Image (cartoon, helix red, strand yellow):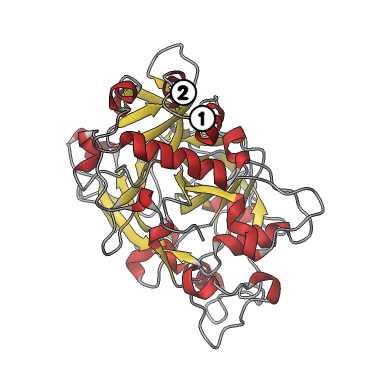
Amino acid sequence: MTPLNATHDPARTSWVASANDGVTDFPIQNLPFAVFRRTGSAEVFRGGVAIGDQIVDLAAATAAGVFTGLAQEAAVAASASTLNAFMAMGNAAWSALRAALSDALSTGSAHERALRACLVPQASAEYAVPARIGDYTDFYTSIYHATNIGKQFRPDNPLLPNYKWVPIGYHGRASSLVVSGTALRRPVGQSMPPGATQPSFGPCKRLDYELEMGIYVGPGNALGNRVAMADAESHVFGLCLLNDWSARDIQGWEYQPLGPFLSKNFGSTLSTWIVTMEALAPYRTAWTRPADDPQPLPYLDAPDLRSNGAIDIQLAVTLSSAKMRADNVAPHTLCRTSYRHAYWTIAQLVTHHTVNGCNLQPGDLLGTGTLSGPTATEAGALVELTSGGKQPVTLPSGETRSFLEDGDSVALNAHCVAPGRARIGFGTCEGTVLAAVV
């Protein structure tokens, strides 16, 4: 776990006024990374850091001579069109740049004049997927989600025997990971209608979202070398929001025996900003496992796992239909939960992924799987909230939803709060459903 330092000081303020309002996702205690350019421009995409409603253009800040030493080297790497080289540098470089940025953006900084010229309003920017994601692995870390889904098929035995012993995962499609704001077409594929004797082909009828966190890998490991629990988080750069959309009817027909395919590969949406593990340090919390559940096997255990293995990230999902937007009706909140409920931790995912020598690489993405909490209102997908479509959700417009309709826009949001600490957030992960091409 990253120790607390001056960058976490809740009393620290910024000369960027919008960073001090107490409600922004991006106070000086956060400083998340993204890749951006000015909207509609021919500029190259480059690395930036959020502060209030502004972006620090790292290429411009580097040219202005704001940084020195290791922070300068890190800023050069983070100025590229992807963050992979920066991610590969590791904790010392990440921390050096974070500390330099925090000092330069602090109230009274001697760098204010030089750095002010390097700011770009977030409202004037467009974004790209922030890393070249070579591989994407999706896990299944919420026991509440796994139980809720299992009950729909196996009411008396919802969890399969392996769930409490091993982090379940599968390899997803990296090429169709898209950045927040990208609209996705309704997928098509085969499904088996109830009572039918043969499958049909056509647009998905049970389209769903999945509330997840994305975990960006920093320094990788050589093929054949495993990452131990004690070192696992040093291989993690930061977290984002992830909507791993799911075509439930297509998935139900195709996933046995190998798993999702067309039901997932049409697109998964990533939030713009990556919140670093260092920024999340004040929001660590205890990780618990019920005493009568199997305890982790030795390779998935560590001395500090139970004291601070989890992170309390408050999560929310909202839905806005085309009618709601036309009538200026505010988005409807479908669920609120926390990442602290996950059954498997970040360190356990990294360790399990590499225990047989699998080589992770800088910029690889791990998904947590749908994150649900212990109560009905904490369900992270419509298939849970609506009991498989049997109990539709009513929207403020009077419309109902068992699953997503064309024109629906789903937004994921997240923030962290803790006593005596600043509030930090992740921005928004949003996507809109377009009609299928048939």
Q: Indicate the position of residue 204 as horizontal and vertical percent values.
A: 51, 44
Q: Is residue 132 left or right of residue 15?
A: right
Looking at the image, tell me whether mark 1 or mark 2 is earlier in sequence order.
2
Q: What is the C-alpha distance between the residues marked 1 and 2?
A: 7 Å
On screen, residue 116 above or below 291: above
Q: Amino acid at mark 2?
A: Thr
Confirm or deny contact between disc 1 and disc 2 (CB under 8 A). Answer: yes
Residue at image location 61% in from the left, 33% down from the top: 85
Residue 75 seen in the current view: yes
- The residue wearing badge 2 is 62
Q: Is residue 239 left or right of residue 358?
A: left
Q: Indicate the position of residue 376 as horizontal and vertical percent values.
A: 35, 69
Q: Amino acid at mark 1?
A: Gln
Outermost bottom residue: 292
Q: Indicate the position of residue 432 as horizontal and vertical percent values.
A: 39, 36
- The residue wearing badge 1 is 72
